[in-house]
Image (tube, rainbow, N blue to C red):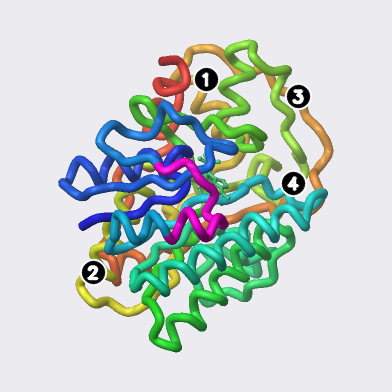
Amino acid sequence: MRCLVTGGAGFIGSLTAERLLERGDEVIVLDDLSTGHREVVPTGATLIEASVGDQAAVRALLADLAPDACIHFAGLIAAGESMSEPGRYFEANVGESLALLEELIRAGVDQVVFSSSAAVYGEPLGTPMSEDHQTIPTSVYGATKLQVEHALEWMSRQGALRYAALRYFNAAGGSEGHREDHAVETHLIPLALSALAGQRPALQIFGTDYPTPDGTCIRDYIHVEDLAAAHLAALDHLAAGGASLVANLGTGHGYSVREVLSAIETVVGRPVPAEEAPRRPGDPAELVASSARAHEVLGWTPTRSSLGDIIADAWQAFSA
Ligand SMILES: NC(=O)c1ccc[n+]([C@@H]2O[C@H](COP(=O)([O-])OP(=O)(O)OC[C@H]3O[C@@H](n4cnc5c(N)ncnc54)[C@H](O)[C@@H]3O)[C@@H](O)[C@H]2O)c1
């Protein structure tokens, strides 16, 4: 298979591209390097440096390289930032995605795997959350992901393409040459590791009075290797003629901020410098996925997402 991977210079896209190449697929990476890193694009992939919204560039690459399918990772990912720059987020995540989808359909590329997010759900009514949970995003970022899902659903209903929208919970971990390295870092584990390494001030624990056993927020962390495996499974599902699908990717088990910090201390042997801070608006107490659908339809089960593995691999990638 020849796969177009947008955002293949980013954390999850670059690792997925590497796993595709390893199994013998051809990979074309489309990335404008706005937040990504040229050096993580795996050897063997063809890098086209352009924006996904650049229809002329995308049209030319589709004509020249004729991919069979597309995994669309590219986008802006910081929920907090999205609240202060809504226009930029809608343009980048919705406008540019629609431009890309239009070109894919025009070129007859009718299998698309899309990076969606747990942020489409908004305030949880309970946990674990299944795909049938209501979708009322509480961030611009979540709203942009949901809009692209809606566009895909309508395109699929019209028979223009088939898609898998994968709603990741908290991507984490790392692998050789692949670590979380976002321009605007908001994720707990890389922030904690940077604080530990003295590259940032003490980690702020936002809220210690949540209705959770230790008072801190609980999240479902999923190893980037497990995410990559799910994308390969979703591509195979679509290539085999499978129907369009929306599926959560998580473990069904959550860890609190304090549990994550204590796991880091166990792995690294030193405590993370941390200080307690007030809650942030819009942070639910607990977000945990039910991934039963990904298991049933894609045959996917996370194998690397114990907290110990996630932290050990994140630390190894961070300190390499
Ligand atoms: N990391 C997470 O926890 C998480 C959770 C849920 C969903 N997601 C989604 O997964 C995807 C990948 O996340 P990541 O953590 O690898 O992010 P990342 O920032 O590491 O990678 C994004 C990549 O997209 C590229 N890009 C951005 N806008 C582009 C554009 N208009 N045209 C071409 N390239 C562009 C960037 O240069 C970068 O290489 C994103 O869509 C994100 O919203 C991530």
The amino acid type, in three-letter code, at marker 3 is Glu
The amino acid type, in three-letter code, at marker 4 is Gly
Q: Earlier in the sequence, mark 1 or mark 3?
A: 1
**Number of numbered labels in the structure image:** 4
Q: Is residue 39 above or below residue 31?
A: above
The disc placed on residue 248 is: none
- Report the mark closest to the observer, 2 or 4: 2
The amino acid type, in three-letter code, at marker 1 is Glu
Q: Earlier in the sequence, mark 3 or mark 2?
A: 2
Q: Quadrant of the N terminus?
A: bottom left
The residue singled out by tag 1 in the image is 265
The residue singled out by tag 2 in the image is 239
In front: 19, or 43?
Answer: 43
User: Residue placed at 40% from the left, 68% from the top?
Assistant: 164
Dot 2 crowding, Cα within 10 Å, few <14, some 14–19, many 20+: some
User: Residue placed at 64% from the left, 18% from the top?
Assistant: 195
Q: Quadrant of the C terminus?
A: top left
The amino acid type, in three-letter code, at marker 2 is Ala
Dot 4 crowding, Cα within 10 Å, few <14, some 14–19, many 20+: some
The residue singled out by tag 4 in the image is 80
> Hey, which residue is sitting farthest bottom in the picture?
158
Residue 57 drawn in magenta: yes
Helix, strand, or loop for circle 2?
A: helix
Q: How far is disc 2 from disc 4 in space, using C-alphas?
A: 36 Å
- Report the mark closest to the observer, 2 or 1: 2
